[in-house]
Image: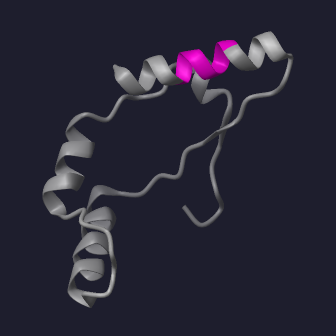
Amino acid sequence: IQAKKRREALMALAGELGVDLRILAPEAEEAELRRRVTERLAGGADPAEADIAVLEKQLATLDPLTPDEAAQVIVPPDA
């Protein structure tokens, strides 16, 4: 819910300022996300401390975009 409130505030601010708002929303399958985290951790050179437990928490607390927000999404071609 916290992410949704932040997005709502940004959408309201964009409306007040009269500017377009775009949301960058890369997507990947859960198995691919797990593979990437595992690979990064195996490399040992990444300063990030995020591990599979962090990924699982992010997935469990994922706050889907509303239809209004989804209309503003830009998906990177390599996502």
Residue 72 left/right relative to 37: right
The percent coordinates of residue 79 (x first, y second) are 54, 61
The percent coordinates of residue 7 (x first, y second) are 54, 24
Q: Looking at the image, which residue is at 26% across and 44% down?
A: 58
Q: Nearer the viewer, residue 9 or 56?
A: 9
Q: Looking at the image, which residue is at 65% across and 19% down?
A: 11
In the rendered image, which quarter contains the N terminus? top left
Residue lying furthest right: 18
- Residue 52's image quarter? bottom left
Q: Main secondary structure of the magenta part?
A: helix
Q: Looking at the image, which residue is at 70% across and 35% down?
A: 22
**Residue 68, placed above or below residue 29:** above
**Residue 15, placed above or below residue 37:** above
Residue 27 left/right relative to 52: right
**Residue 60, placed above or below residue 43:** above
Residue 9 painted magenta: yes
The percent coordinates of residue 62 (x first, y second) are 32, 35
Scheme of image coloration: one colour
Range of magenta residues? 7-12
- Residue 76's image quarter? bottom right
Residue 74 left/right relative to 8: right
Q: Nearer the viewer, residue 22 or 5?
A: 5
Residue lying furthest front: 47
Residue 45 left/right relative to 42: right
Q: Looking at the image, which residue is at 24% across and 66% down?
A: 49
Residue 77 painted magenta: no
